[in-house]
Amino acid sequence: MAVTSRMAAAHPIPGVVGGVVDANKQREFADWVEAKEVRNTEFTDWMQEGDPYSQVDIEVGQSYGPFIATTLGAQAGASDEQLTVASTALLRAGDQIEIKQFFSGSTTEYDDTKTEFATILTVDSATLITVERHENAVSDGSYTVHASGSVVTVKSSAISYNEPFRDGITFRGDLAVQHPQRFENGEITYDLAADVATFEAPGGHWERDLMHAKNDLPHQRNWAFINGVKRTGSYLVTPKIPYRLGGAIWWASYVPANIIPITGLLNLFDFTDVFEEMATNHTDGPGDTVWMHPRMATIWSEMLLPYKGMFGPKDTSIDIRFTKLNTEHGAVNGVKTDNQWPMSKILLCDRADFRWSHFASESQSMDWLYISRGKEELGALQRSWNMAGDFSMHTSNLTHLRLLDDIETRKELYPARSNYL
């Protein structure tokens, strides 16, 4: 049987090739893809919220009673009974003092074999005191020689009978000033004719733009709570300067003694040294939280890897998480990370150390505000939306913070990683 072939003829329709319409489009993204950028706010969520504030300048301070201390301004020789100190302020006759000197070449480690106790007999000038060396237990000419810069601390005091009481030493504490910061996204304005549901974005672009603002502003605030540097604003200059708050790093750096310069590779003993120092010098101990960047948390976990399982295998799984660090001076229950935390800095603190809040006047709260206006308010066929808020934060325990600074962040330089590669 003969086979007859037939050729299908394409109709010559404009914009059509081979019967397939080429001017049409198929939208694969019926819904615009959701924003997937990481906009977490771990540090803000961790902090406790305090009472609303009502002033532009937030004064933070405390009354406290620091130890009375000074340093030797010149060497104390083997026969010297009049000593030169940096200042005799707050030193009084009858005070028992401790003189401690550093090991040669060190500014942190004391040579306790040369510690001396003495009693102040008279305060002679702004820089001179006469003392009874070694509590008269060592003869003149055999006194311990102390280098200039040795630390002099009042350890006890006494007053003679039949003497009127001396003026009491009182402290009012230092004062730190913090500012609020205003966050706002700018006004989102739409023509009513454009604010419709389209096949490209069901629900319209309007809702999407609002969603992005609601996600981004708390993220900006979280960054400021961590990295913000306080700045006093002024609307009297051109251009105007906005007020800016100081974040956790700024607060921790406010007291120079809080900063622990690592200046290189981090190691486990940096933590134990800080814990020991905090247990020695602070009532609240080492704190309960360690904040760091995810990169530093990786380095920290890998750094501990050689120490894990050193007393025998526990199971057949590999677990390099840092879950808890127990020391003689306290425990840290894990590490907190925030991707906005600076990589080269680690903060040891306590959750009770920080508070954040918003401005609140008698008539208006400046927590996040959503301001929406329609055509009636704008006088046009438009509507607009804005989001804003005034926020600040402070620490209630300024000397309890310890900031490990200038840490090496290149993972390949750490021995734990190179040992396994």
Image (cartoon, rainbow, N blue to C red):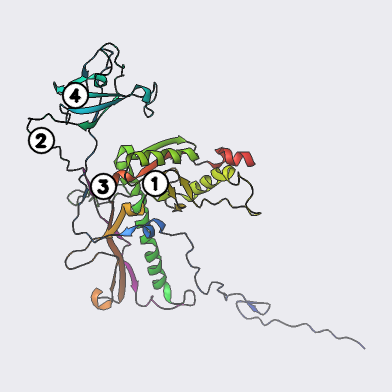
- The residue at which mark 4 appears reads as 120
Q: Is residue 202 above or below residue 226?
A: below
Q: Is residue 111 visible?
A: no
Q: CA distance from mark 2 to mark 1?
A: 39 Å
Q: From which residue to which does the magenta span run?
A: 172-200
Q: Amino acid at mark 2?
A: Asp
- For the residue marked with disc 1, what is the amino acid? Leu
Is residue 293 covered in magenta?
no
Please state which of residues 290 and 284 is positioned toward the viewer in this rendering: 284
Q: Position of residue 397 (x, y in %)?
A: 29, 48
The numbered mark, 3 or 1, whose residue comes first in the sequence reads: 3
Circles 4 and 1: CB atoms closer than 8 Å: no
Kindly report the distance in space between the C-alpha atoms of the residues bearing marks 4 and 1: 39 Å
The residue to which callout 1 is attached is: 348
Query: Which quadrant is the C terminus positioned in?
Result: top right
In the picture, which quadrant includes the N terminus?
bottom right
Which of discs 3 and 1 lies nearer the camera? The answer is 1
Residue at the image position 30 percent from the left and 57 percent from the top: 356
Residue at image coords 46%, 59%: 38
Q: Secondary structure at mark 4?
A: strand
Q: Amino acid at mark 3?
A: Arg
Return the mark for residue 231.
3
Sequence order check, earlier mark of 2 and 1 = 2
- Between marks 4 and 1 in the image, the one whose residue lies nearer the viewer: 4
**Callout 2 secondary element:** loop
Mark 3 Cα-neighbour bin, 10 Å: few <14, some 14–19, many ≥20 = some
Front residue of this view, candidates 218 and 351? 351
